[in-house]
Image (tube, rainbow, N blue to C red):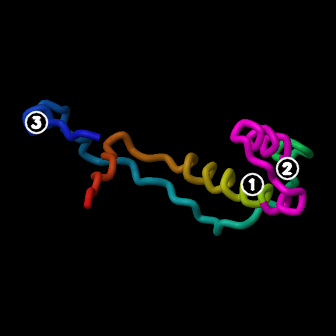
Amino acid sequence: MTRRPKKARALRKPARKAAKPVKRATKPFKKSTKPSQPGSLDEFIAAGARALGLKIDKAWQPTVHSHLEDSLRHGALVASFALPDETDPAPVFEA
């Protein structure tokens, strides 16, 4: 990611005077009790394993299913968080 030159930053429109407060989640995160559609994640795991050339042992299938379900739920939580238009991306740090 590259930064804009200072000259270009000065040409941007000024930020709005009062931004709307960001709505935060009020309920604590808890595991879903709704079962997922039967076979949907298992078929997705099998298709991904075939595409990557991986062999998943039957004993590990429930664990892989659980981790994928958790990852998708966390991703949905992050994607549902609304950010104001004025939000800038985080700077890139290099060592």
Q: Name the residue under label 3.
A: 10
Amino acid under disc 1? Glu
The C terminus lies in quadrant: bottom left
Which quadrant of the structure image shows residue 63? bottom right
Circle 2 — which element?
loop
Label 1–label 3 contact, CB within 8 A? no
Label 2–label 1 contact, CB within 8 A? yes
> Which residues fall within the magenta stretch?
42-63
The N terminus lies in quadrant: top left
Q: Mark 2 points at which residue?
A: 36
Of mark 2 and mark 1, the one earlier in the sequence is: 2
Q: Is residue 44 in the magenta section? A: yes
Amino acid under disc 3? Ala
Q: Residue 69 carries which label?
A: 1
Circle 3 — which element?
helix
Q: Where is residue 13 in the image (x, y as percent from the top left)?
A: 19, 32
